[in-house]
Every structure is written in structure tokens, then in C-alpha cells.
Image (cartoon, helix red, strand yellow):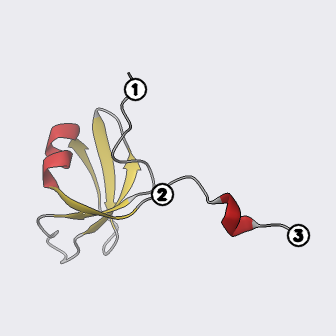
Amino acid sequence: MSVIPRFSVGDVVRMKKSHPCGGDLWLVMRTGVDFRIKCLKCGRVLLLPRPKFEKAVKEVVRQNGPPDPAAHDIR
């Protein structure tokens, strides 16, 4: 049984608490046991353990999913 990961590299997530700079949007740079995220307002990079990260996420704003083949119709 395979588990589909909820977060992937390139996703933009909104956290429950805002960063001291005032931003609440973060870019996921690394996934796994730890998550590396980057504040999109000030550029600060944090490394959070998975349980703390998953608890702090409010919503996924933009997913970096596989590209849509229909969007790149070459003719």
C-alpha cells in the first residue's frame, strides 16, 4: 500500500501563525523526516520536524503538481 505524500517540494503553504516579518506564506524546499521551508516575504529559511510542520500548516495555497500535458499543446 503506497501513501500519497500531502506536501511536495515547490508547494506554497499558509501557516497558522505568521512569521515575525508579517508573512504567512512559505515555500516547501525539502520534504522527508524534516521540512525545509522559506518565508516568501523575507526569505528566512527554517528546518522543522515533520510533526511540527504538519501541525502548523493551515492550508496548501499552491501545489507544485505534475505539469498538465494539455496546457503545453504543441502544434
State the residue lying farthest toward the right.
75
Could you say where residue 6 lies in the image, as x and y percent from the top left? 33, 45
Alpha carbon distance from label 3 to label 1? 37 Å
Kind of residue at disc 3: Arg
Query: Which residue is painted at 16% across and 39% down in the image?
Result: 51
- The disc, 3 or 1, on the residue closer to the chain's N-terminal end is 1
Under circle 3, the secondary element is: loop
Q: Which residue is mark 1?
A: 2
Query: Which residue is painted at 30% across and 44% down in the image?
Result: 35
Query: Which residue is painted at 48% across and 57% down in the image?
Result: 64
Q: Which residue is mark 3?
A: 75
Could you say where residue 43 lies in the image, as x and y percent from the top left? 34, 67
Q: Nearer the viewer, mark 1 or mark 2?
A: 1
Q: How many marks?
A: 3
Q: Which residue is mark 2?
A: 64
Report which quarter residue 1 is drawn in: top left
Under circle 2, the secondary element is: loop
